[in-house]
């Protein structure tokens, strides 16, 4: 490695597969590049699954080293979290080789939660190491505290008759626990335990939230009498970190924007369930009838249904042809709704759509990246959690922050019928006596809070500057 004298600090970020991790890793890299003039390298385990993944990598502005996914044993790791953990663990030799041979010695190594198996490599090479939690502080608390819950709670978490207590944070209802906690006998649960135990072995944790949004959770994570005694390392709230419209320049979005330009302000509900979310044929039909029954304008990004597994598209990221949705919607639906609705196959430039003045609501899977994009666009949500920690997100959004409405029962437990869907759409999208809805007012307040946190002197701007100073000093 060459002498680093007179060279910029070099930050290497390591992303696990999936746009839900790749996008926030890249956007964090851009912050170091633009705000602190660091050299940034992205190590990304890619499946070369779709044009979406390729376009995200092309727009990164950073040096990118793609690491092909290792071959895993046939049938190994049926659950998504298990597959991700096994993939990232098998990539450790490639990470060691990459870090050891870089021309400019890395000043810091930052991994997402699935990359913690690579932290010892950074320790061997005497490189500062951080974990970047692309979700929020409440999720981080549960993940880190899981090893304690594992010892004190007997039986399945989902069968408990009272919420799970986390020191200093809101309790977690049994039905809201993230996917690996659904079955303690599944391999993904033991993998998740390992992840939670590995995070304190870093030099610090960056989390994609901001102080004013989750002050209580963040204070608990730092308090040695509360979660700080488990986490043990500093926590830096550096969010919201998410895509900007200029990251979507490779998409042919003109026709969608042209349609939106013709619609009244705040009149359109945008419908998309993330890069990996799927649902049953029956549920898709109910959503279609619900949108039609609501009599509201909509843009719906449609993908082919999948029975049984709600994260089935995560590692393929919407790969498919424009005909995949043809025939899965109710007969005549497109023709009946053509004056008020736009059906988009496979993919849409989400940030561009959300920031359009005609969009007034987002029917969303509550992935944290999509949530931040919606909040920063001032658009309230209809919460429709599907997998991962999305049930926690929906509870946070609807019951604590007040920026979303949600279904009476979890969509993963029961088919949500058209009447309820129509009611939720009308509740969020319609103006009442010329006044905006409560969720719309609240989301605009939180947007202002986030903008203040990101501005010079704001809490998140200051936190990232602190991290940069540590890296430079290291």
Image (tube, rainbow, N blue to C red):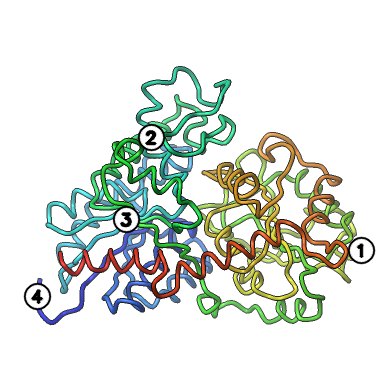
Task: Using the rendered image of the protein, determine whether residue 324 is visible from the camera's viewpoint.
Answer: no
Helix or strand or loop: what does disc 3 sit on? strand
* Residue named by callout 1: 336
Which is more N-terminal, label 4 or label 1? 4
Helix or strand or loop: what does disc 2 sit on? helix
Residue 202 appears at what percent x and percent y? 24, 49
Task: Using the rendered image of the protein, determine whether residue 432 is visible from the camera's viewpoint.
Answer: yes
* Residue named by callout 2: 145
Residue 111's disc number: 3
Residue 2's disc number: 4
- The number of numbered badges drawn on the structure is 4
Asked whether the residues under the numbered discs 2 and 4 touch, taking CB atoms below 8 Å apart as contact, a structural biologist would say no
Which mark is in front, 1 or 4?
4
Residue toward you, 179 or 471: 471
Q: Distance from label 1 to label 2 (Cα)?
A: 51 Å
Residue 416 appears at what percent x and percent y? 77, 41
Q: Distance from label 3 to label 1 (Cα)?
A: 48 Å
Which is more N-terminal, label 3 or label 2? 3
Which is more N-terminal, label 1 or label 3? 3
Residue depicted at 24% across the width and 57% down the height = 95
């Amino acid at each position: 490695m060459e002498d680093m004298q007179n060279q910029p600090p070099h930050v290497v970020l390591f992303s696990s597969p999936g746009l839900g991790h790749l996008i926030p890793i890249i956007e964090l890299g851009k912050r170091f590049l633009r705000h602190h003039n660091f050299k940034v390298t992205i190590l990304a385990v890619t499946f070369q699954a779709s044009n979406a993944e390729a376009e995200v990598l092309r727009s990164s502005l950073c040096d990118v080293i793609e690491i092909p996914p290792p071959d895993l044993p046939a049938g190994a790791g049926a659950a998504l979290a298990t597959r991700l953990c096994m993939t990232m663990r098998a990539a450790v030799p490639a990470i060691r080789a990459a870090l050891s041979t870089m021309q400019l010695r890395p000043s810091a190594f930052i991994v997402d939660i699935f990359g913690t198996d690579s932290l010892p490599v950074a320790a061997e090479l005497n490189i500062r190491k951080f974990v970047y939690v692309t979700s929020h502080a409440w999720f981080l608390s549960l993940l880190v505290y899981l090893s304690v819950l594992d010892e004190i709670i007997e039986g399945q978490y989902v069968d408990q008759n009272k919420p799970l207590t986390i020191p200093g944070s809101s309790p977690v209802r049994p039905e809201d626990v993230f996917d690996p906690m659904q079955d303690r006998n599944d391999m993904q649960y033991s993998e998740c335990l390992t992840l939670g135990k590995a995070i304190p072995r870093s030099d610090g944790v960056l989390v994609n939230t901001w102080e004013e949004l989750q002050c209580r959770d963040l204070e608990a994570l730092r308090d040695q009498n509360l979660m700080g005694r488990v986490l043990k390392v500093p926590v830096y709230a550096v969010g919201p970190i998410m895509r900007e419209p200029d990251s979507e320049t490779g998409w042919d979005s003109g026709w969608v924007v042209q349609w939106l330009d013709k619609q009244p302000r705040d009149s359109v509900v945008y419908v998309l369930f993330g890069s990996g979310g799927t649902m049953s044929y029956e549920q898709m039909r109910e959503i279609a009838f619900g949108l039609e029954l609501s009599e509201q304008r909509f843009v719906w990004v449609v993908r082919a249904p999948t029975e049984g597994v709600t994260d089935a598209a995560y590692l393929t990221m919407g790969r498919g042809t424009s005909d995949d949705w043809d025939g899965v919607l109710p007969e005549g639906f497109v023709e009946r709704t053509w004056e008020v609705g736009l059906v988009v196959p496979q993919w849409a430039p989400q940030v561009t759509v959300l920031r359009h003045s005609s969009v007034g609501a987002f029917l969303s899977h509550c992935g944290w990246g999509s949530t931040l994009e919606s909040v920063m666009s001032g658009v309230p949500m209809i919460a429709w959690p599907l997998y991962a920690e999305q049930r926690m997100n929906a509870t946070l959004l609807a019951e604590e922050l007040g920026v979303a409405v949600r279904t009476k029962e979890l969509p993963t437990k029961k088919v949500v019928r058209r009447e309820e869907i129509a009611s939720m759409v009308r509740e969020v999208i319609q103006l009442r006596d010329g006044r905006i809805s409560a969720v719309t007012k609240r989301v605009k307040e939180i947007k202002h809070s986030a903008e203040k946190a990101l501005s010079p002197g704001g809490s998140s701007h200051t936190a990232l500057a602190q991290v940069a100073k540590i890296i430079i000093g290291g």
